[in-house]
Amino acid sequence: MPWTTVFTLVHLLGGHPADLRLLWETASKSVPRLPEEPHLADHLAAGLRGARLAAGHPAAASICLPGFSQAETDAVFDGRLVPEWKALCEVLRSLDADPEPFKALWAAHRAAQGQGRRST
């Protein structure tokens, strides 16, 4: 199904098309487009929200990243915080999502922001 169709359906149903973009690119074997640097964290967070949606939208309290408070986990899903790769992989696996499609976005964000424990 073309992205324009998915976008339109999600939009008409009141959803956020960006949350499904990374999932659609992965499923359609499209080469993901990396956004400009200021939008990398937002796109990563949108992919996480899509993975959460695909997992049946579990309660936020059940998706706490290891070593993170619930507020910090919420910030990850909002795009205000980008965790270490290991923590991101753990939360994706807990959602039954393959971390591989997220790797390029995460790496590009890290390259743009530095290598600290957490970046915004």
Image (spheres, helix red, strand yellow):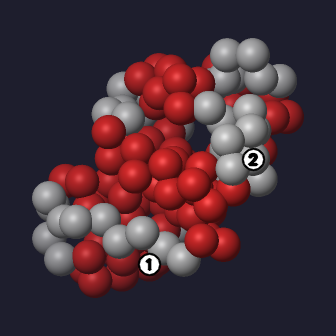
* Residue 37 x, y percent position in the rendering: 60, 71
Secondary element at image label 1: helix
In-front residue for pair 70/105: 105
Residue where numbered disc 1 is placed: 12
Q: Which residue is mark 2?
A: 119
Quarter where residue 25 is shown:
bottom left
29 relative to 76, above or below: below
Mark 2 Cα within 10 Å, few/some/many (few <14, many 20+)?
some
Q: Could you tell me the amino acid type at mark 2?
A: Ser
Q: Residue at x 38, y 35 (%)?
A: 99
Q: Nearer the viewer, residue 48 or 32?
A: 32
Q: Which mark is residue 102?
A: none
The residue drawn where x is 15% and y is 61% is 28
Q: Position of residue 9 (x, y in %)?
A: 35, 74
Left or right of residue 114: residue 111: left
Q: Quadrant of residue 42?
A: bottom right
- Kind of element beneath mark 2: loop
Q: Position of residue 53 (x, y in %)?
A: 47, 44
Q: Amino acid at mark 1?
A: Leu
* Observer able to see residue 14: no
> Quick one: which residue is furthest to the top in this view?
67
For the residues labelled 1 and 2, the Cα–Cα distance comes to 34 Å
Seen at 32% across and 39% down, the residue is 100
Q: Is residue 51 visible?
A: yes
Q: Position of residue 30 (x, y in %)?
A: 18, 65
